[in-house]
Each structure stands twice: as structure tokens, then as C-alpha cells.
Image (cartoon, grey):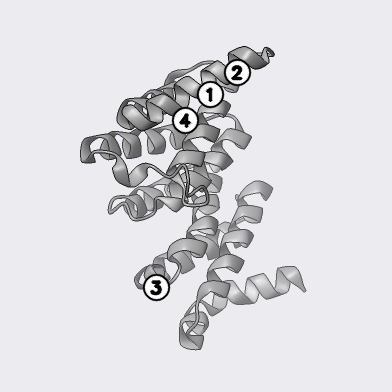
């Protein structure tokens, strides 16, 4: 970012103008920078701007519903691809927040479960970080996936091959998901996970 206040102000004005007049082009450019830039600072700034304009926490900036179906499809594809390849953990975590908020994607859950089959612990951690956030947004709608989630959480928490980062992410996802279930029978159905969580936090 420029140290000149005038240049920063001018850049902000241009950005806001683009947001108002050509939001599709703006969002596509940001996600392409995130996906292709070799510069971590550029990817970080792209991620921050995308999160600000694609999540409901920033109602005055939330423009996702106004994007065309084609732009939304390209955006989803590049965000998920970036999750696969992003080597910087702080950027990946910001991406997890954005992907979780856009959890209405019909193809999101199959792709997340596919990540878990990877031997790459980084991808497994990303999967669990997304699930930890998903519990806040669509926890109840994940009930049909209880058996699969039970397997993912339990294996991540207890497997001897799980890294400490994977176990921490699995613990966070398990706690968030158990807390979001309002029906006691649903909580009991993932008792194995709950027992491990209770043992860990005891």
C-alpha cells in the first residue's frame, strides 16, 4: 500500500467507483490476483478485500448477491482452488472465513470431504478450519452429514498420524459443531467426538 495519503485516497475512490459501476470485473480481478500473484502481500490484500465484500459482516460492502451467476461460479472455483494451493497459513485462514460465509454452494461439501482424503496435513487442517466456521452459519443443515462428520472429526482427533495443527483444528470444529446442535439426540449421535472433546478440555 502507498505511504502517500493522497495516492491512497485516490486509489480508494477508484476502488469504490469500480465497486459501484462494475462489481463483477472488480471481484474477478481480486480473486485472480489472489489465485496467481507470487507476492504474499498482494494475496493478503486481495483476500482482505474479498472477505470484506463477500461476507455479511460488512453489510454496506456486501455485493455477492449482485454478481452475475457466471461471476459467482468463477469466484467459487478460484476461491476453492486458492484454498488448495495457498502456502501462507494466515492467508488460508482468511480464505476459510470467506468460503464458510458463502456456504450455500451446492458443490462445497463434496469438495471439502474430498480434501480430507488428501495425505497433506495442510489441506486437512484447512478442511477442519472451514467446518469450524460452517458450524456458525449452517450447523443445523449439516445434520444429514452427521455420520461423515463424526468420522472426519474422530479420525482427525485420534489418529496417530494427525499433526498438532490438524488436531487443534479438529477440536475447534468439533466443539463448534456440538454446540450448534439444538437436539440432544443429535449430540448423542456424535458421542464419540463429544467424549474426546470433553476429555481434552477437562
Toward which corner of the image does residue 132 lie, by quadrant? bottom right
From mark 1 to mark 3, how far is it between C-alphas?
43 Å
Which mark is nearer the camera, 4 or 2?
2
Tell me: residue 9, above or below residue 111.
Answer: above
Marking on residue 143: 3
Question: What residue would you read off at disc 4?
Answer: 85
Question: What residue would you read off at disc 2?
Answer: 8
Asked whether the beta carbons under mark 1 and mark 2 sit within 8 Å of each other, the answer is yes
- Residue 114 visible from this viewpoint: yes
Q: Is residue 59 left or right of residue 202?
A: left
The location of residue 84, given as percent across then percent down, is 44, 35
User: Which part of the image, by quadrant, shows the N terminus?
Assistant: top right
Question: What residue would you read off at disc 1?
Answer: 12
Q: Exactly how many numbered labels are in the figure?
A: 4
* Mark 1 secondary-structure assignment: helix
From mark 1 to mark 2, how far is it between C-alphas?
6 Å
Q: Which badge, 3 or 2, comes first in the chain's sequence?
A: 2
User: Which part of the image, by quadrant, shows the C terminus?
Assistant: bottom right
The location of residue 145, given as percent across then percent down, is 37, 68
- State the residue at coordinates (53%, 53%): 128
Q: Which badge, 4 or 3, comes first in the chain's sequence?
A: 4
- State the residue at coordinates (53%, 18%): 11
Q: Which badge, 4 or 2, comes first in the chain's sequence?
A: 2
Q: Residues within 10 Å of mark 2 (few under 14, many from 20)?
A: few
Q: Which badge, 1 or 4, comes first in the chain's sequence?
A: 1
Amino acid at each position: 500500500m502507498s505511504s502517500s495519503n493522497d495516492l491512497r485516497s485516490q486509489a480508494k475512490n477508484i476502488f469504490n467507483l469500480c465497486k459501484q459501476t462494475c462489481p463483477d470485473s472488480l471481484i474477478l480481478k481480486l480473486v485472480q490476483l489472489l489465485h496467481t500473484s507470487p507476492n504474499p502481500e498482494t494475496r493478503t490484500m486481495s483476500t482482505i478485500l474479498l472477505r470484506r465484500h463477500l461476507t455479511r459482516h460488512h453489510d454496506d460492502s456486501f455485493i455477492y448477491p449482485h454478481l452475475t451467476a457466471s461471476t459467482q461460479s468463477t469466484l467459487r472455483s478460484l476461491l476453492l482452488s486458492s484454498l488448495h494451493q495457498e502456502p501462507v497459513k494466515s492467508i488460508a485462514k482468511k480464505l476459510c472465513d470467506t468460503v464458510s460465509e458463502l456456504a450455500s454452494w451446492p458443490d462445497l461439501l463434496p469438495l471439502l470431504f474430498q480434501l480430507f482424503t488428501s495425505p497433506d496435513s495442510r489441506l486437512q487442517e484447512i478442511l477442519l478450519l472451514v467446518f469450524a466456521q460452517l458450524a456458525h452459519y449452517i450447523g443445523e443443515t449439516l445434520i444429514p452429514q452427521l455420520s461423515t462428520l463424526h468420522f472426519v472429526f474422530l479420525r482427525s482427533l485420534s489418529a496417530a498420524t494427525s499433526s498438532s495443527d490438524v488436531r487443534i483444528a479438529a477440536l475447534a470444529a468439533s466443539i463448534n459443531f456440538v454446540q450448534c446442535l439444538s437436539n440432544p439426540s443429535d449430540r448423542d449421535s456424535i458421542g464419540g467426538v463429544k467424549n474426546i472433546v470433553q476429555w481434552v478440555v477437562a
